[in-house]
Image (cartoon, rainbow, N blue to C red):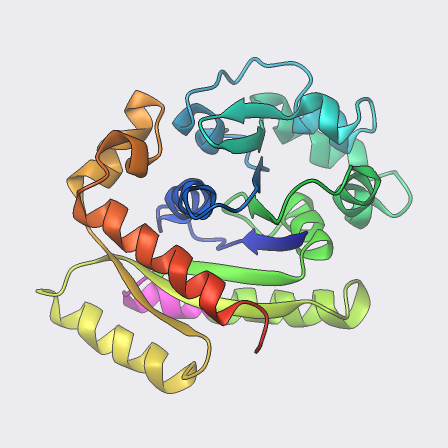
Amino acid sequence: MRCIAIANQKGGVGKTTTAVNLAAALAAAGKRALLIDLDPQANATTGMGLSKALNPNVYHVLLEEAELLSAVRRAAQVDLLPASPDLAGAEVELVQRPQRESVLRRALEKAPDQWDYCLIDCPPALNLLTINALVAAERVLIPMQCEYYALEGLAQLLGTIRRVRSRLNPGLELHGVLRTMFDARNRLAGEVGSELERHFPEKLFRTVVPRNVRLAEAPSYGKAVLDYDPHCAGAEAYRVLAAEFLQREWRQ
């Protein structure tokens, strides 16, 4: 199983949208996908049509009160490890535990090897939950809007990845940067996109996810956009992203 953390400490950049729809697109391409919702807001959980009140969930897995497989639910073609608001307290409860940064990795190591890909939807913060995701993952996918402040946040996240690599997970690598919510009519978006191309010539995904009303609507119906409106521009972007994701695989 290949494990990818989808991370950005800045909120509202399409991180959960990417986690949900990339998982769905990989499943549509015939891959077995596990999506882990590691955000206390549980948006990936509700966006896949499941309740925040499911028990057990990822909170119980992190506290080692439940095995990972016992908490996994089926949502469309994707297996989902759901979150709940209780997850906000997990960070406090984990602080005193030994090896608290690697709880999620140990849970994944004990789980049966039945998925091709595991995607972890991280919270919009560089906290202990995100560190657990980065320690468990082999690669990091960073969704970001093409705006000025996003570049500053990207530098901070890359610094965190380097620190995790040096201290906790030597194999961690950047898998790619994904431009999301892209508006081609916005000159600043084009300028920031060009900066990303200059700084990440090998790591920037060619796929660009546009602003799309159907992408924004789909979570309110508890569906991935590929199930909600498979012919819209957002659905097509994530199908293309999944193809590029699989094509580049782990060769970099």
Compared across the picture, whether 121 is left or right of 173 comes to: left
Q: What residue is rendered at 36% in x and 23% in y?
A: 222
Of residues 107 and 102, the one nearer the viewer is 107
Residue 153 occupies which quadrant of the picture?
A: bottom left
Work out whether residue 20 can be spotted. Answer: yes
Residue 95 point in image, percent of width and height = 81, 40
Residue 98 point in image, percent of width and height = 91, 44
Residue 165 point in image, percent of width and height = 73, 69
| Magenta stretch in the rendered image | 145-154
Of residues 249 and 133, the one nearer the viewer is 249
Work out whether residue 153 can be spotted. Answer: no
Compared across the picture, whether 102 is left or right of 6 comes to: right
Residue lying furthest left in this view? 185
- Where 3 sits versus 149, above or below? above
Of residues 82 and 114, the one nearer the viewer is 114
Of residues 88 and 178, the one nearer the viewer is 178
How many dots with numbers?
Answer: 0
153 in the magenta segment: yes
Residue 240 point in image, percent of width and height = 32, 58
Q: What residue is rendered at 48% in x and 62% in y?
A: 246
- Where 158 sits versus 27, above or below? below
Q: What residue is rendered at 27% in x and 74% in y?
A: 192
- Where 225 sits versus 56, above or below? below
- Where 53 sits versus 105, above or below? above
Residue lying furthest front in this view? 30
